[in-house]
Amino acid sequence: MEREQQKGQLFGLGVGPGDPELITVKALRLLQAAPVVAYFVAKGKKSNAFGIIENYLKAEQITVPLVYPVTTEKLEPPLCYESIIADFYDTAAAQLSAYLNVGRDVAVICEGDPFFYGSYMYLHDRLGARYVTDVVPGVCSMLGGTAVLGAPLVYRNQSLSVLSGVLPHDELKRRLADADASVIMKLGRNFHKVKNVLDELNLSGRALYVERATMQNQRVVPINDVDPMASPYFSLIVIPGEKWQG
Amino acid sequence: MEREQQKGQLFGLGVGPGDPELITVKALRLLQAAPVVAYFVAKGKKSNAFGIIENYLKAEQITVPLVYPVTTEKLEPPLCYESIIADFYDTAAAQLSAYLNVGRDVAVICEGDPFFYGSYMYLHDRLGARYVTDVVPGVCSMLGGTAVLGAPLVYRNQSLSVLSGVLPHDELKRRLADADASVIMKLGRNFHKVKNVLDELNLSGRALYVERATMQNQRVVPINDVDPMASPYFSLIVIPGEKWQG
C-alpha cells in the first residue's frame, strides 16, 4: 500500500501597507521559508504586494503570479463580472492545490492584512477546508494611513466605521453621519462623490487624505486640493475621532 | 552663546497584538535603537506591551514605566476619573520631556497600533507639537483576532463597524444592526450586555469570540459557552461579513 502524500500547508501572509519594513517578523520568517510564493496581480500591471517583498526572496523560491482577468470591457450575457471573477478564483485555487497536493507549502502574500478586504480571503474560502492554513495578520492600509497622517484615529469608546468609496451617495452619507470616526477606502474614481458627501455633512474640515501611505510614492494632500480625476485606488480618507480631553 | 541642545525624537511604536513575532521589522529596529523605552502599566500589574518586547531589549536601554493611577475607589468631588487621568497623562508627558529635552530619543511602545485606541495618543496630543515624532503602525488586536479565528472579516464593499463593549445597549444594538461586519472590543464586564444584544438581533450564530488573541494564553471559545463573569478585557467578538460568492 502506498503511503499517502503529506499535503503542504497554506499560508496567508499580511505584508503590510507598502513600506517593506512594515512586514512583521513572523510573516518575513514564513515568507522566506516558503518554497512557493503566490501573489495577485492585474494583467499587465506590477503587483504591489510582490513589490513589497521582492527583495526578501531568495533565488530558489518559486513565485506564482495569479493574474486577474481584465474586466473593463462590456460583457455579453451570460458573462458577468461575478462569474468571471469566481472562475478566476477557482482557477487560482486549483493552481495552488497543485503545489499543496504534492506536499509543498504555499505562501500567498497580501498587501495589508489577509482578512481585511484581501483577495486571499477567496482562496481561504476555497482551500481552508482541504489544507492546514495559517494566517499571519498584517498592518492594514488604514493604520498605515493614520500613522503617516499623524492622526490618532479612535479614542476610548468611540465607534469606527470603515467604508468603501464605492457605496452609493446616500448610504455613504448616512453611515458617515452616524460614525465617531471613519476611514473611507477605495477612493479612485469615487473621490468626487465622497467629497460631495463630506461637504454636505460639513466634515471636510476634519477629513485627511493620503495616497499610497507608507509606499515610496506616498502623497499627503489637503483634501480640498485633491484632483478628483487623479485620485488613485490606493488612497484613503481619514476622519479621526474628536480628541478626548484625557 | 550656548548652542541650543538638540531635542530627542519621540517614537510611537506599535508592537502588535501579543505574539512578539507580530512586531514589524521597522518597530523592532527602532525599539532596539532607542536609548529610552517607555510603556504604560496599571499599578501592581504586569504591562502587556512590555511583556511583548521584553526579550528584544538590551541591557543598556533605560525603561520608563508610566504607571496608571488606580481609579476604582469612589472619588470625592472635585475629583473625577477624567481629571485624574488627564493629570496622569500630563505627568507622563513631562516625564518623557525630561529625556527628550536633553536630546535622548524616546520610544513609547503600544500594544496593537498606536492610533487605534492606544494610550500613546494622549502623549502624542501633548508632545506632538513640541518634538519630532514618528509613529510606526502595528497589527491591531482586531486583526490578530480575525487571523486566529480564521475568519475573513470584510469582503469587497462591505462596511465594518468597530464598537466598544462599553456602549449602552440601545446604541450597540442600533450600530450592530446596521453593519455588514463588526468587531466588538473591550468586552470584560460588558460581555453579558453584548451577548444579549447579539441574541436579540439573531447574530449569535455568526459571532466568534476570542480571548487574548495571539498571546500565549489565547483562548477561542464558542460564544454560547463564554462565562460572562470571566471574560477578560482583552477579548473580542467578531461578526464577519457574509462570504461573497466571488
Image: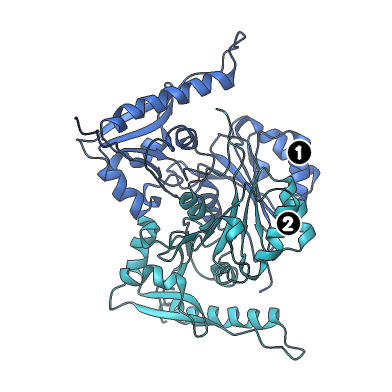
Chain colours: A blue, B cyan
The answer to whether marks 1 and 2 sit on the same chain is no
Mark 1 or 2: the one toward you: 2
User: What kind of residue is marked 1?
Assistant: Glu
Q: Is residue A10 above or below residue A87?
A: below
Answer yes or no: is residue A15 visible: yes
Residue A155, percent across and down?
64, 64
Q: Nearer the viewer, residue B53 or A148?
A: B53
The chain under label 1 reads A
Residue A6, percent across and down?
26, 37
Residue A29, percent across and down?
29, 50
Q: Residues under labels 1 and 2: Cα distance?
A: 24 Å
Q: Is residue A217 above or below residue B91?
A: above
Q: Is residue A144 above or below residue A65?
A: below
Q: Residue at x 48, y 59 (%)?
A: B213
Q: Residue at x 37, y 68 (%)?
A: B53
Left/right placement of residue B62 relative to residue A159 reads left
In the picture, the quarter occupied by the N terminus of chain A is: top left
The chain under label 2 reads B
* Res A171 label: 1
Q: Secondary structure at mark 2?
A: helix
Left/right placement of residue B200 relative to residue A71 reads right
Reading the image, the residue beneath label 2 is B197
User: What kind of residue is marked 2?
Assistant: Val
Residue A11, percent across and down?
37, 42
